[in-house]
Every structure is written in C-alpha cells, then in structure tokens.
Amino acid sequence: MMETTVMLLMTVPILFSFLFLALSKKLYKILAWAFFIIGTFLSVQLVLGGVGTVEVAGQNFERLENIILVLEALVIVYMFYVSVKHKNLPTLALVAIATGISVYSFMNVAAVESASFNIDQLSQVMILIVNIIGTAIILFATGYMDEYEEHRHLNRQKTFYFTMSFFLAAMNGLVMVDTLGWLYLFWEITTLCSFVLISYNQDEEGINNGFRALALNLVGGIAFSVAIISFSGNGISNLSQVIGNSAGIILLPVFLLCIAGFAKSAQMPFHSWLLGAMVAPTPVSALLHSSTMVNAGVYVIVRLVPAYAGTPLGTAIAVYGSFTFVICSALALSQRNAKRVLAYSTIANLGLIIGSAGIGTPLAVSAAIMLILFHAISKALLFLCTGEIEHTIGSRDIEDMSGLIKKAPLLTMLASLGMISMLLPPFGVLLTKWISLEAASSNPVVAILLVLGSALTTVYYVKWLGTILSSSMDKKKTTHLKPETYFPLSVLGLSIIVTSIFVYSIFNYFVNPVVATLLGAVPTVSGQGGQFVSDIGGFAYAAIFIVLVLAILIYFATKSMFTPRKVDYYMCGENNLEKDTLMFRNGLCNYEKSSVSNIYMENTFGENRLSTVGYVISILIIIAALAGGVL
Amino acid sequence: MNSLDIAKIVLVLIGAPILGCLLAGIDRKLTSRLQGRVGPPLLQPYYDVRKLFEKDNVVVNKSQNLYVVMYVIFVVLSLLMLVFEADILMIIFVYTISSVALIVGGMSTGSPYARIGSSREIMAILSYEPILIFYAIAIYMLTGTFKLSALDEASTPLLMYIPLIFIGMLFVMNIKFKKSPFDFSTSHHAHQELVKGMFTEYSGPGMAGIEIGHFYEYTFLLGLMFVFWKINILMGLILALIAFLFVIVMDNITARVYWQWMFKTSWTVMLLISVINIVYLYIYEIKII
C-alpha cells in the first residue's frame, strides 16, 4: 500500500506534466484543479499510511537504476547544452567539473544493490507541504499566467506547467528517498527546473539570473557529489545511516552536504540567486520560496542533525544560521520592493531554521522542523498575494500599496493574515521563534543574534502591514473574484489558522517522533490547557486566540453604542480634497498633494552597506566551521 | 481556575486602570509644578475620559476603532500574564501585539500626520524591543527558566546582577511612556512639531479607549520594573516609583530628539551595555536560584 503511494507521488506529477504538454490551454484550469485534488489526496494517503521504509531491490531496482542513470545523463547533457548555447563559461566549467565527478563516482564508488525510500514523519510533513501548497500554487498560476503573458507577449505556458509539475515530482522523490545516489539526482533535477523557471521570460535579465541560480546550485551539487564519494569510503550510502555513526569520522562529508544545503536554501554567501529568482512570474517565486527548492536544503540539514549536534560544527552552523537571520532581516528592512522584502525574509527564516538545527537540542530541532512547515504556508500566501496585488495595482512597490484595503478588501485581509502570522503570536511562526529563542538562551552569541533579527523582522512587516491597511479616499472595489485565484489563497489562509490552533497536535504527531529518531531524546513538552509548555517556559496560544475572538466580539458589541459618523481627514484646519486626493495649501495658496512614506533606513541597512559585510562574515564563519569543526 | 484567581483577575481589571489614572494625574500635577503652574486636579485624566465617552464617535474609517479594542485587550492580557507570573518572553510578545495594533490603527486612518507618527513609532519598536528581550534572557540565565513564578524563590533581587539592563529598561520606559525626549510619534505636550501624531484621527470614544489602554499600560510597564526586586514587595514598589519619577523628570528636562538619535543610542550604547551584562552572566555562570 505504502509502496504504491510512494510511487504514485512521483509518477502522478510527471503524468500531469506530460498532460500539460499534450493538452490545450483551455483545459489547464481543469487539469490544475484535478492536480490539486489528487496531490492533496495522495499526500494525506501517505500520512494515513503511517511510517516505514520501502525497499526497491532485484529486477525493479535494476530497471529504476537504469532510468536514473539515463535521467542523470540527460540532466548533464541539458546543462551542457544551455551553457554552450548562451556561452556562459563559468557554468560550463562547473558542469564539466560536476560531470567529471559523476563519471569518477560511477567508475570507482561501489554500486549499491538496492535503494530505499524512508517514510517518517519528517517526510510526511514535507510531502504535505509539497503536494498541497505546491499544487495550490499551480492552481493559482492558471488564473495568473494569461494576464502575465499578455503583458510580456510570451507564449511559453506549456514549458511553464511542464516544469512546475516536474519540479513537484522531483521534490516528492527528494524528501522520501533514503539512498544518497538517488537523492543527488532529485537534487540536480530541482536545480535544473529552477533554472528553466527563472529564465522563463527569456530576456537578458531572466537568463542571467537563471544562470546565477544554476551556477551557485551547481557549486552545492559538486559539494554534494564529493560528499557521496567520501561517505562511500565509510560504507554509508543512505541518509539514515548517518544516525549512530561515530560522529568524528564523517564530519567532512556532513559538512559538504551542509554546504550543498546552504546553497540550495540560498544562505549567505549563496543568497544572490534567490533574489535574482524574482524576475520569474510570481507563482515560480512562491514555489521556490515556500514549498520546494529552498526547503530541500533545510530538509537535508535537519536530516543531518545527529551527525553534528553538540559538536563545534553544530555551534558554527548555529552561529552561521542566526547571522544570516540578522543580516537578511536588516536588508529586508531597507527594501521598498515587496518581492525583495519577501526574498530577504525567506533567506532570514531559513537562516533561523538552520540556526535552530545547529543548536541541536531536542527543543531547538523541533523548532526547526515546525518552522519549515509554518514558514512554507505563510510565505506561499504572501507571495501569491503580492502577485495578485501587482495585477491589481500594477506595482510591487510597498509605497504604492497604501489604500489597498479599499481597492481589494479580501486580498488585503489575506495578505495581512500572512504578515501577522509571520510576526505575532498566537501564530505558528512566532511560536517557533519563541522556541528557538528559549533554546538559544544557553548560547549568548546565537541568542543576541536572534534577538536583533526578531526585532528587525517585526519592523519590516509592521511597516508593510500598516501600509496596505491604511485607508484612502479611493472608492474603487474589485468586483471580479476569480475562484482559481482566491481558492488557493483562502486554503492557505485557512491552513495558517488551523495549523496554529492545532500546533500541539502537530508537534506531538509529526515533530516529536522525528526528534526522537534524530537525537534519541525528545523535548519535554506538554500541551495541557492550550499551552505549549517546555521545561523552561510556556506559550499560551489558546488564551491569545480566545482573547482575539473576544476583542472582535467586544468591538461589534460596542459598535452599536457609538454610532460612527464618517468625516474627511483633518488637514490642519483645511480639509482640501481635490479629485479624491489629499491636498495641502502652501504659502502661495496653491494646492500640493500630500504624500507620506515609510522609513527604510537605506543609509544604515541598505544593500550597498550590508551586502559586503554579509559576504565576508558568512564566508569567514564557513571557513571557521571547516577549520574548527571538521579538521 | 479557583476563586482566588478570579478575584485576582477582577482586581487587576478594576484596580489597574484606577492606578494608571492616578499615575497619569500625578504626572500632570508634578509636571505643572515643575513648570510653575498650579495644574489640573488629580483626577483630571478620569474627567477627560468621561467627557470623551460622551462625545460623538467621529471616524474617518469605519474599522479604525477595532484596532483600539485590540490594543486595550492585549495590554490587559499582558498585564494579567505578568500578574499570573507567566513566561516573560511570551508576555513581551503579547505586549508587541498591542503596540502593533496601535501603530496599524494609526496608519489605517490614512491621515498623513498619523502615518508620520506611526512610522516613527515603528522605529521605537526597533529601538526598545531588543532590550526587552535581553531582559527576558537575563531572567532565564539567572533562574534557569522564563517563568516569572520562579523568581519568588530567588535569593537575591535581579537588580544586583543586571544593573546595566536596568538602565536599558529605564530607557525603554521613557520610550514606552511616550515621554520627551522620545515623544515624536505622539505627544502629551502641545509644543511639539507633531502633536497627536498617531492618534490624530481618533476622537470621542475611540480616544477614550486609547486613554484607558494607556492606564493599563502604565501599570504594566511599572510592573516590569517591579520584577527587578520581586522578592521584596516594598523594594519592588520603590523601584517602580523611581522609574516613574525618572520618566517624569526626564520629560521635563529634555527636548524632543530625532528618532535617528533614539535608534543610534539604543543600538549602540543601550544594546552594548545589555550585551555586556548578558556576557557577564554567562562567563561567571551566576544563578540566583
């Protein structure tokens, strides 16, 4: 039963990718709905099927291994083809190195006799994220891409949906497979798919950014393949064998895998590819940032926790992750472009996940796993909302979004929910931030970095939240609510609330057993009375939910006591409203439009100030990790 | 939840605004004396609120008062959590909800004055929040838990080992009471360049709600200072009183600064001394339980 589900999870997305290729554009909406329903069904099926391993051996294995080899060769050939076609020499060199290593390992590394898929609760969480959020994003895309292509005179939707679906198939394989050789193939396929999607517009900027993503991830890929060779020297060919191996011997390959993970999760100094990725259509950004690509990196890093927990390498990873968290939160503060804010916020949150994994205590590791889940939901919602906002007002500048509540009330509500869930209790992201902070308190360096990062996070989200909720004199309202746009958004919004309410059940069912297998110890957490109680503190989320509902009830109860009378703004004695805009009267009795903008502190936190600092310090920490932790 | 707890809740719900109102009255009285005026009666803040409730509910935006309700109710919740000695980090996060509600409420009116005030208040969050969380971390390092209830068993008051963070917290008090030199988002005085700032579009019952929220908030903030000497109620109260008087005196002897000055001071001097204090606790592994 489980075997069928595992195989279906990889073949169904591939089937859909070919259906998208074969069928006409008119059927895409139906296909996307079907994909969403089947994806959700299969992932729930996998969760209900429980945990276990699926062994592939004998004839089946040989057949699949051959397919894998062919695919690997195809991936390499395609990478050669594109880098020659666009004359991109650095990428070509990296592809050549990667090929050399692959050929070397094919000749020299002892072949494995069987492969296995390891379904535990971590895989289940990842599968849920990929197949529910991922397919919801594809569904959203069917309501988005027509307009997008119309503006840019493109007609490449077949490539788009084919790659998006194939991406999900590769991601599904990646989070279930246990054999390192196969994991590497899925890893490289996601790299390739992201290249195709980022260079979607086929203009110079798109192709350049695509190649940047390809090159940086190839660096990670090379580290990955060297790690496989090095692991095989210790007789390790499965990810799960990392547990229980005496840590000292395998630290070098573990370190290399972490580097591969850092590249994939766009951590400094590899972060520039994720910022470049926003030239692609919004659904691509949403997919890369929330449910797929970047999650692959942190997934592997969390899987490796037993190898580095409690070692100097673990401490270095904790400092590295929390450093990225601070510096990218500061960079996000200085950005006006909504997509860039979200991109930096993604990198920062992944840094927090990596930092928590590095701390390596049961409590911290559970925070890392939960943050993967909560961050994926909130970030997917925020990205899709930003895309829809862009279509509504024609801009992605945060300053242009003021008055959005009047223009698109439902969209604004959903976007606000996304933002609030990133920074305030009782929502999941803050719960995990609270856990990481408490877990980090025994290491002052990490704690200090997390404190600063968390204050910066509050600031850049509140700024944006206030802007979209600020009212204007504009009376326009959108009348047309497309179901394929608003359904995925509502599903994501609802998931934020539901997962936050059932946070303790999620912790108990999914996170606790994973931490138990990874570290051999579980965090002492209890959940009585709607509290999330660890031995050093308690997070009363239920109380906040109740008070939240109470506040809304009080508001509506008292509303009738004080009938509101609506007036125009107070403008210092002169209410000058011309053509629905705010006007001031200046000294010459002329009218001037008033405009207020948020504070971005570009001189303190701007990219030209902090980027270099970020590169230097992050590289130094990685070198220190190598020198102090591994050698 | 037993009857004692319920009595406590009722006492806080009724007692805190009375205390806060009296504090606001004392503030106005003292300030006017310092300025050589007679000043209003002690209960003037109460009369103000009563009058505001009788006024028309004039709004520019139908939902703007929802944010006021959010602000008040989450200040009350954080105060209750403080009284029930919950997780200090959690209390700070709940308190953040109320601050954010007020800022977003100001921005939601869309008035340019309110938006200037709100964006300055966001910078205030950036300046004080790290210090507040360092305070929580210091409590953890000293007691081994974030739960304030553990402080009852402490052998020495917190102040003995975290005096630098106490100084940082005095700075936070000045920001959070929205008093000069940090009253740039909204002010108690009429001579500033931006007077009501964030609250420009609030009047009548909405403004009354904000005032009541402030009463609770005063009590809550002084409660945070009380925790520095929690093992002795008298000493705790004295500390809270000192903090309150410090804020009033600072209000009257300083002029408004730019928000940039606040941010720089906070992220250099105040963060540095807080970090020094944290590192000191870490190196000497000081425990008070």
Image (tube, coloured by chain):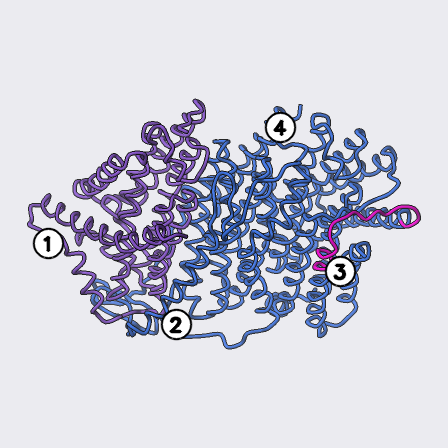
Chain colours: A blue, B purple
- Local secondary structure at mark 3: helix
Q: Is residue B98 above or below residue B254?
A: below
Circle 2 sits on which residue?
Answer: A474
Q: Does the stretch in magenta take in A54?
A: yes
Look at the numbered discs 1 and 3 and tell me whether their residues touch, using CB distance below 8 Å.
no
Separation (CA) of disc 4 from disc 2: 58 Å
Circle 1 sits on which residue?
Answer: B40
Looking at this view, is A270 or A529 the one in front?
A529
**Chain letter of the residue beneath label 1 in the structure image:** B
Q: Are labels 2 and 1 on one chain?
A: no
Does label 4 or label 3 sit earlier along the sequence?
3
Q: Does residue A133 appear in the picture of this structure?
A: yes
- Residue A627: name its quadrant: top right
Magenta residues, start to end: A42-60
**Residue at 43% from the left image edge and 63% from the top image edge:** A549
Circle 3 sits on which residue?
Answer: A13
**Residue type beneath disc 4:** Thr
- Which quarter of the rendered picture does the C terminus of chain A lie within? top right
- Local secondary structure at mark 1: loop
Residue at the right extreme?
A59
- Local secondary structure at mark 2: loop
**Residue type beneath disc 2:** Asp
**Chain letter of the residue beneath label 3 in the structure image:** A
Residue A311 numbered mark, or none: 4
